[in-house]
Image (cartoon, rainbow, N blue to C red):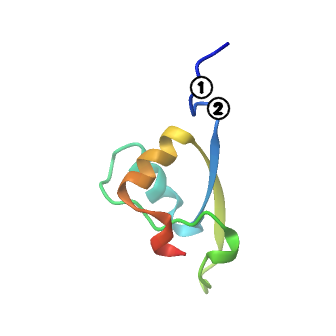
Amino acid sequence: MAEANMNCMIVNVWVHHMQIDELFDFLNERIDEAPPYWLNEQNVPYSISGGYVVVSLPYDSYTHLRSYRDWQGWA
C-alpha cells in the first residue's frame, strides 16, 4: 500500500479573471505577492469588470498560495 500524501488532491480556488496571470506568476515564483482568492464562488465580491474563474490547483501549489495569503481573510 502506498504512503498517504496529498499528491492526489486538487483544490479549486476562485480568482478574478483579470488576476489569473498574477496567480500563475506567483505560483511560478516570478512575483512575491499572491492575488486574492476564494474557495467558494458564493463568497466572491461583486465585480463590474467581468467575473471570476475557477482554477484547479494541485495541493502543493495550493499550499504555496495559502502560505502567503489565507483565503479566510477574503471570505
**In the rendered image, the vertical position of residue 41 relative to residue 31, given as above or below:** below
Residue 48 appears in view: yes
In front: label 2 or label 1: 1
In what quadrant of the picture does the N terminus appear? top right
Q: Residues within 10 Å of mark 1 (few under 14, many from 20)?
A: few
Q: Residues within 10 Å of mark 2 (few under 14, many from 20)?
A: few
Residue 25 appears in view: no
The reply to whether discs 2 and 1 touch (Cβ–Cβ < 8 Å) is: no
* Rendering coords of residue 25 (x, y %): 41, 50
Query: Picture quarter containing residue 17?
Result: bottom right
Which amino acid, mark 2? Cys
Query: Picture quarter containing residue 69?
Result: bottom left
What kind of element bears circle 2? loop
Q: Residue at x 64, y 32 (%)?
A: 8
Q: Which mark is residue 4?
A: 1
Q: For marks 2 and 1, give the CA distance.
A: 10 Å
Is 6 in front, or is 26?
6
Is 50 in front, or is 14?
14
Which amino acid, mark 1? Ala
Q: Which mark is residue 58?
A: none
**In the rendered image, the vertical position of residue 39 relative to residue 74, given as above or below:** above
**In the rendered image, the vertical position of residue 16 relative to residue 4, given as above or below:** below
Q: Residue at x 49, y 74 (%)?
A: 74
Left or right placement of residue 28 versus residue 1 in this view = left
Q: Which mark is residue 8?
A: 2
Q: Residue at x 38, y 52 (%)?
A: 67
Query: Picture quarter containing residue 3?
Result: top right
* Rendering coords of residue 43 (x, y %): 63, 76
* Rendering coords of residue 31 (x, y %): 32, 53
* Rendering coords of residue 53 (x, y %): 65, 63
What kind of element bears circle 1? loop
Is 50 in front, or is 23?
23
